[in-house]
Amino acid sequence: MPNSHLTHDEFFNSLGELFTSQKGKDHGSVFLTQKRLTSSTGASTPSRNEPLADIADVLSNDDSPSATYPVIIRATDGKGREPRTDGKGYQVRKDGKKVKLSTVVESDAIDAFYARYAEICKAGMMALKPRDRTKNKRKTKGKKKKITTA
């Protein structure tokens, strides 16, 4: 699925499955990203020697401020690599499958999309295991005691 985007319903179903698959794991993570999708017509890529040379051209080619753009929403499990068995670094996953989901939302459908997106994210995040931060609290309490006694 390198260049194809899912429909909204397919994206929501797959996102729900992604949250449930991460539910029972110790270090299950889900990464959610979103950004404005612009057309790349007329915009040239900056060179290493002059990274800001074409900024005036890009700004002049930009549409009016009232122009609307679609938004691309992405979700992944971030599992392109896994820890090595000897504990030294990372290796490529054996199954080689990193879950990647993406969909494009037009500006006129954004409100309905975000309403359903928020419901699925809230339900999925309730099932995720919260991080255990008690170790960090113990370390900071120990440091405070050492500072006050010195």
Image (tube, rainbow, N blue to C red):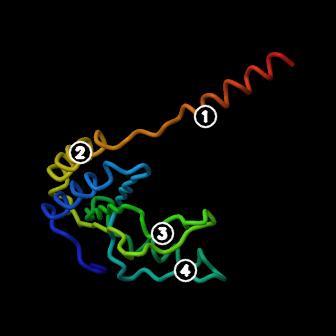
**Looking at numbered disc 4 in the image, what kind of residue is underneath it?**
Pro
| Classed neighbour count for the residue bearing mark 4: other residues with Cα under 10 Å, few (<14), some (14–19), many (≥20) | few
Secondary structure of residue under mark 3? strand
How packed mark 1 is, by other alpha carbons closer than 10 Å (few <14, some 14-19, many 20 or more), is few
* Amino acid type at mark 3: Arg
Q: Earlier in the sequence, mark 3 or mark 1?
A: 3
| Residue annotated with mark 3 | 81
The residue to which callout 2 is attached is 118
Quadrant placement of the N terminus = bottom left
Q: Residue at x 33, y 60 (%)?
A: 65
- Label 1 or label 2, whichever lies nearer to me, is 1
Residue at image mark 1: 136
| Residue 123 in picture, x, y percent from top left | 23, 42
Indicate the quadrant where residue 118 lies.
top left
| Residue 42 locus on image (x, y percent) | 39, 82
Closer to the observer: label 4 or label 3? 3
User: In terms of depth relative to the viewer, which is nearer, 34 or 24?
Assistant: 24
Instruction: Identify the image quadrant of the C terminus.
Output: top right
Which of marks 2 and 1 precedes in the sequence? 2
- Towards the viewer: 69 or 128: 128
Residue type at mark 2: give it.
Ala
The residue at the point 49 percent across, 37 percent down is 132
Is the C-beta separation of discs 3 and 1 under 8 Å?
A: no
Q: For marks 2 and 4, give the one nearer the viewer.
A: 2
Q: CA distance from mark 1 to mark 4?
A: 43 Å
Tell me the distance, in whole angstroms, between the alpha carbons under discs 4 and 3.
Answer: 31 Å
